[in-house]
Structures are given as C-alpha cells and as structure tokens.
Image: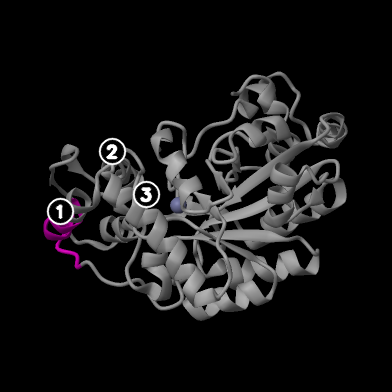
Amino acid sequence: MLVRQMWPVKQLGLLGLRSVSRANIWPGLSALAGNSLRVLMYHRVCDPDAHGFFGMKSVVSARPDQFAAQMDYISKYYNPISIGQCVSWIYENKPLPSRAVLITFDDGYRDNMTIALPILSARNIPFSVFVATGYLDDEQAFFWDWASEAFCQSHVKAGYLPELGDRNWTNGCSQAIAAEWINAVAPLGGNARASAIAGLSGILDFPVTRPPAGTYLTWADLEELSRQGCTIGAHTVTHPMMIGLSAGQARYELATSKAELEKRLGTPISSFAFPFGRTDEYDTAYLPLLSELGFKIAFRSTGAFNLRSECRRNPYEVRRCGIGLNDTLEDVAFCVSGVPRLWQH
Ligand SMILES: [Zn+2]
C-alpha cells in the first residue's frame, strides 16, 4: 500500500501530449534508452464496487478489464521479464531485451491469484508478488482495509479522533475521512499503531475483526503461485513504515519475513519491496541490512525507469511506477515509457 504520488502526466494532458493518438510514440522513445528497466507496481486487481468488496477502494490498481487492456499493451509494445532476469542483469551483466518491463504486486491480496494470474498467464507475462507475511491466511486485516470498513459501516458518524481532532463523516463511505485517518496512522510504529486502531474501534463502536476469508493470499496460494512461475518476494511481517525502527525491529521485519517464506516455499527469497516505499517513507540506513540478509534486489514505489549503472551501484532502491484505478491506458503507456524520468529523480 502506498499513498499515491501524482504524476506530472496530468500537466502533460494540458499540453495535449497525452492523447490516445500519441500513446504509441512512447514505446519508440523507450527503445532509445538501452540497458534499462521499467517496473510497474500494482496492488489489487478487482472491482471495488462489487458486492462483498472488503477494504480500501483506492488500493485497487485496476479493474479486471482495465488490467487486461494494460497487459495487452505491455505485450504488444514491451518485453516483460522476470525478477531473476533483473538480478542477472544487475550482477552478471546479462543483457535484458530492449523495452524490458517487470510487473510487480505488493501486499498479498488474493485477487492477484484469482484475477491477475489468469490474465498474465494467457499473455506469458512473468510477475512478482511481495507479501507481508503477517496477513497471509487472512490472519488480520491491514489497518487501511479495516479502517475503511469501520468508517463506512459504523453507526457513529461524528466524534473526536485523537489523530485528527473533531470530525464528522456523515458520508462515511466516501472514504475521505478513512484516508485522512490512515495517512495519520501510517507512520506510527507497532504499539502506537495498535493503540490507534483500538482507540478508533472504541470510538466507532466497530470491532477489530479478521477480514472475510479470501481477502488475502493463503500460504497454499503462495505455493500455487510459485508453481505457476510467479516470483515471491518479502514485504516485511507487519507492513511498518521503515523509518525510526530499532535495529532489532528492522531485522525482525526483514529476516523473519524472508526466513518464513523460504521455509514454507522451499526456495530462496532474494527480493524485497519497501512498505509504502516513497523515498520519505523508508530510511536508507536499512539498505546494508538487506545486503547482509542476502536480499539481491529491493524496490521503492516511485519512479519507473532504471539504468543498469544505477542498479549496479544500488540494487536496493529500484524505481517503480504505481498504477491506480483512475489511470487511463494512456497514463500507463506514458508511465511505462520511462519518459517522466526526464524530470523525476
Ligand atoms: Zn505494501
């Protein structure tokens, strides 16, 4: 999950550079940048308006038909690659095809398997899923999913929220108040976050419950995804913002998630994605720990385009472009081209 970063793509729209007719110039430009890698980041692929949807709607990256159209575009104009190819490219200088793209998913939502997997398999597109192990098997809900449901379903529609002050949310299902609360709580460490959740549960008179079965991936699903060629990566245990963690906490989050995945899946886990993952949402002080624990590659959640020289120098902050529900196919085309890198660090 991340707090979405707005791309300057909207400003380009004002200049008339974002029209459908121009969408196909981007792969051509992209091909000019040799020895480079583009990475897309997804979370959920499903219909957020479907009956029985549980969670925060803005975590949905694409509806199934949108996602299929995006993957058709990637198949037509780019060369999808696996994380293993990225690692060989960085460490062994094995060449990538031109216009190489890596598709990734964060958090471990079950629709990655039930909806995204068939779409990707039909197009022979490799992909990776980064899972926060503490949520597998629907053990607990991510706090953003629970808070979205709590504000929506609670009979309480106004009150004093310690993190925000006096508020009313008569249109509680708009999710605006939930998003505000989630942003305030995201930086909190484990105990403070747990206290905030317990406090909100009391204020809203809404219990902290497990999510409905089938919201998140199960361990059995991960084994199946692995068998189908998906690369599983770590995304911590509890999904903390990795700033200000003690050395012990940071080691626990990284080492335990890696070890548990390796034990259950019987395969080395060499990739990691920073929770939240904007450059102001993790501390680079943890990068040496990633190396020490045997991770080969790690991803942040901003940027999109990477040169090999950059990845070789630092394989632990590989840039990714987050895709959101409101992104049109043109937005995705522009994002995957890497062109925004011209003015983005
Ligand atoms: Zn995440």
Prevalent SS, magenta region: helix
Place of residue 52 in the rendered image (x, y in percent of width and height, measured from the top left): 44, 72
Type of amino acid at the residue the image marks with label 2 = Gly
| Label 3, residues with CA under 10 Å away: few <14, some 14-19, many ≥20 | some
Was residue 34 drawn as part of the magenta stretch in this picture?
no
Q: First in sequence: mark 3 or mark 1?
A: 3
Q: In this view, does 111 lie above or below 39?
A: below
Mark 3 and mark 1: span between their CA atoms?
Answer: 25 Å
Type of amino acid at the residue the image marks with label 1 = Ser
Q: Disc 1 beta carbon < 8 A from ligand 1?
A: no
**Contact (CB < 8 A) between labels 2 and 1?**
no
Q: Disc 2 beta carbon < 8 A from ligand 1?
A: no
Q: In this view, does 229 lie above or below 99?
A: below
**Snapshot quadrant of residue 84:** bottom right
Q: Name the residue under label 2.
A: 244
> Which residue occupies 38% across, 62% down?
256
> Which residue occupies 53% across, 41% down?
301
Q: Name the residue under label 1.
A: 195
Mark 2 and mark 1: span between their CA atoms?
Answer: 18 Å
The region drawn magenta spans 196-207
Q: In this view, does 236 lie above or below 50?
A: above
Judge left or right: residue 134 versus residue 29: left
Judge left or right: residue 185 versus residue 310: left
**Snapshot quadrant of residue 241:** top left
Was residue 201 drawn as part of the magenta stretch in this picture?
yes
- The answer to whether one can see residue 206 in this image is yes
Place of residue 344 in the rendered image (x, y in percent of width and height, measured from the top left): 61, 23
Give the SS element for disc 3. helix
